[in-house]
Amino acid sequence: MAIDPAKMRIEGVYQQRQPGYYMVRAKVPAGVLSAEQALKVCEIAECFGKGSVHLTSRASIEFHWLQEECLAEVIRMLAAVGLTSRGACGGAVRTVVCSTPFLPCFPAVQVLASKLHLHFTGNPHFEGLPKKFKIGVDAGYAGGRHLIQDIGLVYAGEVSGVSHYDVWAAGGLGREPQAGFLLQEGVAEERLIPLIEAVIKVYQQHTPAGKRLKHLVKDLGQEGFRRLLQERLDPELTLSLSDGCDKCLTERPGAPPVAYLEARVFAGELSAGRMRELATVATSFAGGFLVLTPEQNVAFFLKDGIAAEEAAAVLARAGFGGGSPQERIPFRICPGNHECRMGLVPTRDLSLELIASIGGNGERQGWAIAGCPNSCSQPQLADVGIVAVKLTRGAGDEQLPLFDLYQRQDGEAFGKVVRQGIGLDELRKIVGQLGRSGKD
Ligand code: SF4
């Protein structure tokens, strides 16, 4: 029986650009992945894909080049190690992310992210939404990613032993970037699920199909949205999220300097062979867990007593020595038209070309390329963001991409467009200049 691609979205499956091929996106709450899960990921990529995976800027794992007949088996294999793709695409609560793995409160927020994931994933009350619904749980404000979530929770400390969170709402990037607003300050942990559920219900009831929460808030205004929320929200309801013991999957990052290592993964593209090496490092040095970061890299929190130099040497022997320009210059990249149906440019090829011209101080800045205005690689949060905005016809009738260029200054929520609709030659030239000038 042929599958219905529209119905498969809720299973985390999209049609790929190339006819007959599909992408499956697996959720990894807070990016925390066990070595066993990583090995299963390798097996899936080798058995059914082209032997590699794409790590996204939301710490999910994408398998490309899958054929229809293997989709059910891929989903089964994910489930065998406690992973799921349910709700990773379509109108559902997407991967619950943590963008601040290197802050000291990461243990607390990774546990919360995992609980929210378990609560919302596969729950029919929270599926069939007008569009995606993104939740982020952060250990602090560094990086500003709370501003791009439908609900962004930021750890605000403990009061009488109970964790509290600032709750931000209605952020998002895409074609109409909108920074989230502070919905409630210092919310006790046991009030989080009732509050998020009420937000989702308001969103579900009042938003047309295809629109995000940010569109509803834009239409109603923050006060109008708050009024609807109050009608939905039970002021007394609390749902305890406390544990019987001090849970945490990764080793605990101690007080700074945190003992961690990072494997830089160019463009988030990781072969199964290299991922196996990372799983081995996790097992030997990091308590059996690795962490997918929002920069599309892989981090390890080292066990007490582990010499970081020894672990770094093993990582370097596995090919993650950090010496190449692709490893040194931080570039977030979406798959672009290599695999994505929406893609206008081959993002990986383009980034390699630009990296060659950046040089100089380029590694002191964060860069991002998005293959279309959907902005999946979060270019508005990079120091320099590049977005392919459309294709135009060249003199020989060939299709030429045009780009918008963003720059983000310290303290700004999002980068601003500094050049609009520029061609590739101009982009190369500007990027070369920016790379040479760099940040102080
Ligand atoms: S930004 Fe566009 S091209 Fe890139 S992955 Fe997202 S939808 Fe595809």
Image: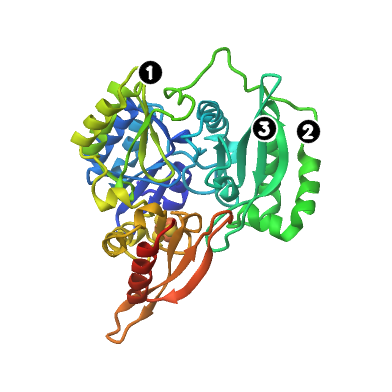
For marks 2 and 1 on the same chain, the one whose residue lies earlier in the sequence: 2
Which is closer to the viewer, label 2 or label 1?
A: 1
Which callout, 2 or 3, points at the residue further toward the start of the chain? 3
Q: How many marks?
A: 3
Read off the residue under disc 2. Answer: 234
Q: Quadrant of residue 339?
A: bottom left
Which quadrant of the render holds ligand 1?
bottom left
Q: Nearer the viewer, mark 2 or mark 3?
A: 3
Inspect the image, locate mark 2, and give the three-letter code of the amino acid beneath it. Answer: Asp
Vertical placement of residue 143 versus 292, above or below = below
The answer as to whether callout 1 falls within 8 Å of ligand 1 is no
Local crowd size for mark 1, using a 10 Å CA cut-off: few (<14), some (14–19), many (≥20): some
Question: Observer-nearest residue: 204 or 96?
Answer: 96
Q: Residue at x 48, y 74 (%)?
A: 420
**Farthest left residue?**
317
- Disc 3 is placed on an element classified as helix
Q: CA distance from mark 2 to mark 3?
A: 12 Å
The spot of residue 286 in percent (x, y) is: 34, 24
- Cα separation, mark 1 vs mark 3, equals 33 Å
